[in-house]
Each structure stands twice: as structure tokens, then as C-alpha cells.
Amino acid sequence: MLDTLSGRLTEVLKKVRGWGSLTESNIREVLRDIKLALLEADVNYKVVKAFMDGATAEALGEKVLKSLKPAQQFSKIVHDYLVEVLGGENRELSTKHGLSIYMLCGLQGSGKTTTAVKLADFVMKNKDKKPLLVAADVYRPAAVQQLEMLAGKSGFPVFTGDGKSPVNICMEGLKYARSESFGAVIIDTAGRLEIDGEMMDELVRIRDGLRPHEILLVADAATGQAAVNVAQGFDDSLGLTGIILTRMDSDARGGAALSMAHITGKHIKFIGTGEKVEDFEKFHPDRIAGRILNMGDVVTLVEKVQADVDLEEAKKLEKKIRKNTFDLADFLDQLKQLRKMGPLENILEMVPGLPKKAGISVDETELTRIEAIINSMTKYERAHFKVINGSRRKRIALGSGTSVYEVNRLLNNFQQMKKMMKKFKGGKRGGLPMSQSSLSPF
């Protein structure tokens, strides 16, 4: 997420922490570096100016220059003003007693259809509301089929109506939702390649007919400076209540998308961090600022663990580790639970200081190969990995589409991990191999 900006700002703050004292001269030098980092990340110039005006005035004050720990004070100022640029505080999704109506809008290719399903999943799990998706995009080829396919995987119903008039489809969908006691209606409206009068007129008619509780702009974080203009155009015509940013897992500069909240005055409510339904997070400006500045995001990490990890299974696992009966079947279960939390790169990003300092990168295809290898073993082999001899290794490699070398490496690393667990259990923490290669199953 915003790796380029994160890297630049982390280096700037690292330089500040290396100075014994701060002066007006070196503070101005650092602020210039921060300004360049923001501009290079495609942050809107108005936002950069507002950030610099506030941060400069406070950073040059006596509170920093005469502080016992000026570097920490300066870092806090940068963090606080970054939080302000990102919207100040998070805003919850509005919900009403009875039926809640959510209207999604945006340009074509922004990820509205995928986001509609993610929002349905969020509403069901966090708001305890049964969602109905309404397919109001009758223009893009196979748009309805795409929504039905994505929603079907998660078990969400889709209302298609007559498939001709978007306004009629939405009104009929609303009537159907009320008659069937749904708790939420999510409208997947049609996008266009650019904002035009005809498109906006149709969206205005849908808005006036449904009176949605939320009108959410779905915007691609990789769009660039055009994203700010798009947000302003939709807000002027519809009166947006919030923004959802997609593709926050991309390597694009993304600063323009983060400028939206400051420019439009509309809060970013969610971010999409991958293609899976669960790759969807509430937007917390303070947490995102912490991740950008490499301070981590422990709160979101804990929330993900609580949501995706079975606590009863975790207790059973703890007992197995204590008794040294942890086997490859248990390892496979833990790997699956870990992958449920989303891309591992995103998980590592939430650990304070870890990604930049450790230089860890995760190849998800390696994890897929690990699963394939363990799945190719018999139940007995998973519980007693030491019985896996040469002929068994050949069979497992053939069944998993891997090589004997990869099977050997997994088994050797698993054995090393078992030894480490035994040392931890016995309180012997000295001399443990903590390099990435020793911890990685490949």
C-alpha cells in the first residue's frame, strides 16, 4: 500500500532520528524532502500545501525545538497532519432500522461490481443484515452475469428485474427486498468511461427514486490526479456520502486517491486490498497513516485475527505445541487460516517496523505449492512425517506437481520448526535460527 510514499517518508524520519538536535535549518530541509515525497506520490498539490502549512508552523515551534526528544515530536507532527489529510477520523457505514439502501457509483473499471459483493459480505457479517444485490448495469456486456457469478460464490441473491431500465430495476428491486424482509439493498449502477450528462441524469433518477442512505463513490486508487476530479464531479451531481478506494494493493503511487477526502470533504469509508471478498477493510486514517510511516497497524491486525482465527482451534493448537504433537496436518490448517486473513504482504505491512527492516517479501505461489505437497500426503504421513522415505517423496512430488527437492526442503524446514518449538517450550531461547530462510517452509 503506497510503498513508494511509505519508503520515502520512512527514510526522512529515520534521518531525523539520527540527529541529536533539531534546528530551524534542518527542519526546513526535512520538510522539503517530505513535500517532494508527497508530490512524487501524486498527492494533490492543494493537499500538499495544506499539509506543509500546518506541519511547518508546528514543527518550527518551541514544543519541538526545545523538546528533550525533538525527533519524536517531529515524527508525531508528521503523523498527525497525515491523519488530517486522510480525513481525520473514520466514519462508520450508515445503517437504518429495517432496510438500509446503499448506492454504488463510479467510472467503468473502478471495481464497482466486485466492491458490491464485498460490501454485501461486510453488511452481513458486521451489521447483521441480509443483503440483496441489484444489478442496475444493463450497458456493459456480461455485467449482470459477472455480478451473479461473484455474488453466487458467497451465496448472495441478485435481483435483475426486466434487464432493460436501470431505474425500473432499482425500484422493483427495492419493492422485492421489502417483501422478502431483506436488511440491505446494494445497487450496482452502470459506469462510463468518463462523466457525462446522460450518465448523471440516470444516477440522479435512481437516487431520487430510492433515497439511499449511502451514496458511495467507488474509485480506483491507481487512477492518478483524475480521481480527484471524478470525485468532485460525482459529488456535485449526487451528493456523495463517502468513498471506497479499490486496488490499494497495487504498486501505483496512489497519492491522488488519498487526496479525495481533503478535496471533497467526503470520508473514505473502505479500501479494497485484493480480489477476494474478505480483502476489504474499514478505512481508519490514523491506522493508514501509521502503515504509511512504517509504524504498523496492530489494531487492524488484531481485528483480522479475531475475525478469521478460530479461538477454540487456537487453544487446541497451543496444547499440541506444548506436548510436541504438532504435525503437518496442523501446519496446513494454520496456513489456511493465515491465508484467509488476506495477502501476506498486507499482513506484514501491519507489523510495526517489520516490512522495511526485514526486507521480507512473500511469494504466494510458494504457499500454494506447500499446500499441494501436504495435500498429496496420506493422513498417516502428515501425522508421522519421519516415515516419508525416498519412494514416498517421489510419489508426493508427482501428486503435487512439484519436485523431490521441494518436498525435501519442506520436510527439513518443518523438522527445524519442530525443534524451535521444543526449545521455546522448554524456555531455551538462546541460539535460535531466526533468519527468513530458516523460518520459511521453502
Image (spheres, rainbow, N blue to C red):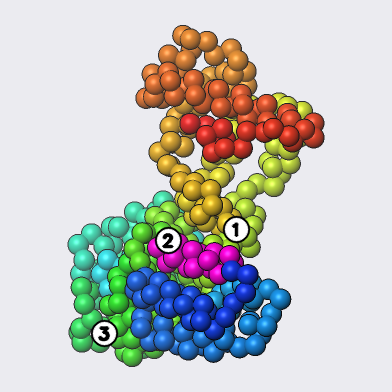
Amino acid type, callout 1 = Pro
Whether residue 3 is in magenta: the answer is yes
Amino acid type, callout 2 = Asp
Secondary element under disc 1, as helix, strand or loop, is loop
Binning the other alpha carbons within 10 Å of mark 1 as few (below 14), some (14 to 19) or many (20 upward) gives some
- Residue at the image point whose x is 61% and y is 88% from the top: 61
- Residue 3 is labelled as 2
- Residue at the image point whose x is 55% and y is 69% from the top: 16
If the image is split into quadrants, where does the N terminus sit? bottom left
Q: Quadrant of residue 143?
A: bottom left
- Residue at the image point whose x is 69% and y is 80% from the top: 67
Q: Nearer the viewer, residue 23 or 127?
A: 23
**Number of callouts:** 3
Which range is magenta?
1-18
Contact, CB < 8 Å: mark 3 with mark 2?
no
Q: Nearer the viewer, residue 252 or 29?
A: 29
Whichever of labels 3 and 1 marks the residue nearer the N terminus, that label is 3
Image coords of residue 153 (percent x, y) = 41, 51
Contact, CB < 8 Å: mark 3 with mark 1?
no
Secondary element under disc 2, as helix, strand or loop, is helix
Q: Is residue 329 visible?
A: yes
Residue pointed to by mark 1: 352
Binning the other alpha carbons within 10 Å of mark 2 as few (below 14), some (14 to 19) or many (20 upward) gives many
Residue pointed to by mark 3: 200
Rendered position, 323 above or below 77 = above
Image coords of residue 358 (percent x, y) = 53, 48
